[in-house]
Every structure is written in C-alpha cells, then in structure tokens.
C-alpha cells in the first residue's frame, strides 16, 4: 500500500500551499484597507471588489478546467483527470459561493438592491447550481468508473451550456459594472487599485491550487481505501 | 463504442431505421399501458389549475402571466415524462438487451429521444388547448408560431433530459437528481420560449422573434449532436 503515503504527501503539499495563500489573503486585506485609495463615489463599499473579482476569477477558472478535464477524460480515460475535475468542481463551488455572497453585500449600498436578474449574476448563479448538481451526481453514483464517465458527460455539456445561458440572459439589459481590466483598451483603474486587485487575484489563484491539491490527495486516499473492498 | 460499419449513406439510413424502430417500440409500450401518458396529461392539467389559483386575478391579467404558466407547465410535464424514460428499460434489464443488439449508440440515443419527444409532445398537445381554455387566451394567428417555438424549445431540453435520464436511473435518488441536473439546462430554451411566446401572444409578427428562434435552433443542433456523441459514455460499461 503505497497510495496512502502518496496521498498524504499530496495533501500536505496542498495544505502548505493553501496556508501560504491564506497568509497572502491577510496581506491583501491590509493592502486593500490601508494602502489603497478609497474610491471617490462608492466609498468603502468598493473594497469588496478586491475579494469579489478574484473569487469570481478563481471560480470561473475552476469551472473551465472541469470542462476541459471532462472532455480529456472521455478521450484518455485517465483517472487522474477525473479526480482533478472533481476537486476543481468542489473548490469552484466554494469560490462561487464567495462571489455570490460578496456580490449582494456590495450591491445593496451601490445598486440599492441585494439581487437583480442581470445577465452576469444570472449566469454565475446557474453555474453554481450546475456544479452543485455535478457534485450531487458524483455523490449518487457508487461505481468509480461509472461516476467518472457520468460526471465527465455533465462537465462537457455544462461547458457548452455557458454560452447559451450567457446569450439568453444577456438579452435583458445588463446592470453589472463593465470590465475594468480585461478589455481591449488599457485598464481604467488607478494603478494602486489595479496593483491590489492583481495581487489579490494571484493570491486567490494560489489558494485555488492549494485547495484543489488537498482535495485531489483526499480523493486519492479515498480510492485507496475503497479499492480493497471492491477486490 | 457503437459498432457502426463505415459512415456511408446507407449506414446513416440504417441508423435512422434503427432509431425509428426503437422509438416505435417505446411508443408501442406506452400505448399498451397508457397509464404513464394519462398520468402525465392529468399532471399537466393539474399544474395549470393550480397556477390559476396562484395568481391574484384583480392584480394580474391572465394574459400577462400566460406565457410563463404555459412554459413552467411544459417543463414540469417534461420532467415527469423523462423520469420514467429509462425506468422502463431498467425493468427486466431491458436496457441490457438493447445494448447487446448491434445498434450504434447514436441510433439508440436518437430512438430514445424520438420516443421521449413523442411522449412530451402528446402531453403538450393536450395541455395547449386546456391552457387556452383556462387562461382565456386568444391564440389568433399566433398558433403556427407558438407550435414552432414549442417544437424547437422542447427538442433541446428533451435531448439533454434523455441523456440525464439514462444517467439518473443508475443512481440512488433518480427522481431528485434529474431535475437538479436538468433545470440549469432548461434555462436557455425556457427563456427563449417564454419571450417568444409572450411576443407572439401579444400579436407581434413572427419576424420579431426570429432572434429567439435562431437561439433555440442552435441550442437544438448543438445539444442533440453532443448528446448523441457522448451517449456511449453513459450506457456502455
């Protein structure tokens, strides 16, 4: 039984990475609150931007990678891809929960409402539901090979669903702030704010990597525990 | 993997023949017992009745609510229908027999899809007149447009529903899992269908809903093709 050892080392590597990311997150708090200028019109409420946008970034990164890993799994049938997809989906659901809670907290003072059926909000809400469904499916299938194939199918279909949900909800006029960084012209954000945002995004990406590594290691350990029973 | 010998025109025709045979089998099973179809129709009618009491008649005119009522009813009826689509294949391990037969998986999916469409279409065909009756809707010249919207939207979500139904029957809580998986996929077709229906019901010309119809058609093409391609991953060990 070499697997649990391998799993343990992966988990501890993941925990170390996550710890670094959490320390970085504390630094982001300090940086955002103490060393970044207060936005002129939104005031302190704008500070949540430094959590909300990086969390959204990590969630979308996580879900895109689930889609890609699912497509590759059906092609290569490598169990590592399935484990990675499962880990990424779990972490993605957690990050999108952060995004979906920080969003309304900001929206209440700025938009005057907790929630609105804006295109981007609706899309992310459905992405959240889609991947909660994905995890529910994983929990409901017992055979590992069957579970991997089923969830890969859902992952692939989900990836293709995104443009459709986006298109159909976009036809309602959108209220969400337009992108300030990833757009054709230069970022329209003051350099200090941009710096904090980029650092926070980096921290969230590291956190994503750390958490996925932990979940991957746990999945590996679980498989090792299940395997003798099946044999 | 589907053992489809070559991809010449004759094998495509053969696959379509097989798909029709599978669909015919399912429809025959349905017509012999009729209980499922009848229950689904009654269920759809009950949903319509319940909706009528869920609205304040003095505050909201029936016609303002009508498109959403129609489509929520169709969506729920489809869900009920899809839940049993593969349950009948489970009994006596009928699915194993089907899988042992030299049928390409694409044809098998297409056959199940056609059978489900026939089932859901029948329920919709009964629900639509009831809806006109209960909600006092004047279809006028909108009927062809609404039938077109219904066909396009239904095809899309029934295709995804067919593949999810095949998965869900092999899990522990199929009846719960199918709606949780399927509802996000129903969102684009439902938004399109409700928007198009409400425009058509208020007497707008068909040209005004072309954008929505195009979206529904693209959804159908993408998801029917994709589901056909990945169906083998769901049914084959």
Image (cartoon, coloured by chain):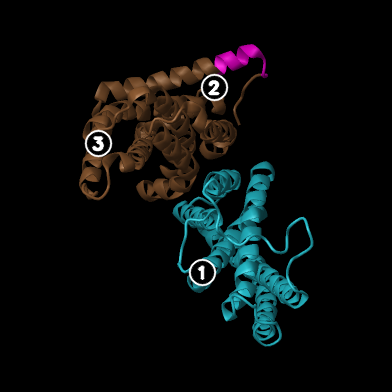
Chain colours: A cyan, B brown
Q: Quadrant of residue A156?
A: top right
Image quadrant holding the N terminus of chain A, namely bottom right
* Residue neighbourhood size for the residue with mark 2, other residues' Cα within 10 Å, grouped as few (<14), some (14–19), many (≥20): few
Disc 1 with disc 3 on a shared chain: no
| Spatial CA span between label 2 and label 1 | 58 Å
Residue that label 1 marks: A107
Residue at disc 3, secondary structure? loop
Residue that label 3 marks: B135
Image quadrant holding the C terminus of chain A, namely bottom right
Q: Tell me the chief SS of the magenta region.
A: helix
In the displayed structure, A199 sits above or below A150; it is: below
- Is B59 in front, or is A181? B59
Give the magenta range.
B6-15
Residue at disc 1, secondary structure? helix
The chain letter under disc 3 is: B
* Residue neighbourhood size for the residue with mark 1, other residues' Cα within 10 Å, grouped as few (<14), some (14–19), many (≥20): some
| Spatial CA span between label 1 and label 3 | 38 Å
Q: Nearer the viewer, mark 3 or mark 2?
A: 3
The chain letter under disc 1 is: A
Residue A69 is a magenta residue: no
Residue that label 2 marks: B102
């Amino acid at each position: 039984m070499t697997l649990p050892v391998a799993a343990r080392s992966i988990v501890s590597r993941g925990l170390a990475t996550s710890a670094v990311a959490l320390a970085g997150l504390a630094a982001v708090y300090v940086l955002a609150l103490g060393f970044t200028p207060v936005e002129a019109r939104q005031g302190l409420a704008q500070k949540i931007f430094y959590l909300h946008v990086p969390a959204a970034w990590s969630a979308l990164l996580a879900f895109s990678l689930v889609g890609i890993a699912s497509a590759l799994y059906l092609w290569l049938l490598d169990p590592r891809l399935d484990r990675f997809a499962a880990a990424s989906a779990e972490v993605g659901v957690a990050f999108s929960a952060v995004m979906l809670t920080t969003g309304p907290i900001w929206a209440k003072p700025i938009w005057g409402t907790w929630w609105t059926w804006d295109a981007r909000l609706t899309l992310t809400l459905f992405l959240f539901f889609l991947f909660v469904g994905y995890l529910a499916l994983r929990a409901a299938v017992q055979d590992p090979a069957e579970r991997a194939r089923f969830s890969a199918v859902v992952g692939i279909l989900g990836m293709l669903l995104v443009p459709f949900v986006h298109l159909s909800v976009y036809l309602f006029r959108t209220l969400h702030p337009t992108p300030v960084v990833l757009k054709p012209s230069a970022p329209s954000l003051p350099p200090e704010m941009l710096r904090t945002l980029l650092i926070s995004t980096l921290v969230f990406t590291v956190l994503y990597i750390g958490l996925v590594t932990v979940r991957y290691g746990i999945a590996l350990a679980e498989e090792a525990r299940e395997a003798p029973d099946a044999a | 993997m589907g053992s489809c010998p070559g991809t010449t025109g004759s094998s495509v025709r053969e696959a379509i023949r097989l798909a029709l045979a599978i669909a015919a089998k399912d429809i025959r099973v349905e017509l012999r017992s009729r209980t499922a179809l009848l229950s689904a129709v009654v269920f759809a009618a009950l949903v319509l009745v319940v909706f009528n009491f869920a609205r304040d008649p003095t505050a909201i005119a029936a016609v303002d609510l009508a498109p959403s009522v129609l489509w929520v009813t169709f969506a729920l009826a489809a869900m009920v229908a899809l839940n049993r689509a593969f349950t009948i294949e489970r009994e006596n391990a009928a699915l194993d027999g089907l899988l042992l037969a030299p049928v390409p998986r694409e044809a098998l999916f297409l056959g199940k899809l056609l059978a489900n469409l026939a089932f859901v279409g029948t329920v919709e065909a009964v629900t639509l007149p009831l809806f006109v009756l209960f909600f006092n809707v004047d279809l006028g010249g909108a009927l062809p447009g609404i039938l077109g919207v219904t066909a396009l939207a239904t095809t899309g979500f029934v295709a995804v529903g067919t593949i999810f139904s095949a998965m869900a029957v092999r899990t522990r809580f199929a009846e719960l899992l199918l709606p949780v998986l399927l509802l996000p996929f129903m969102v684009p077709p439902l938004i399109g269908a409700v928007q198009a229906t409400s425009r058509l019901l208020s007497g707008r010309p068909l040209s005004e809903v072309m954008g929505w119809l195009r979206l529904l058609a693209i959804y159908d093409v993408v998801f029917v093709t994709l589901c056909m391609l990945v169906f083998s991953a769901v049914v084959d060990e």
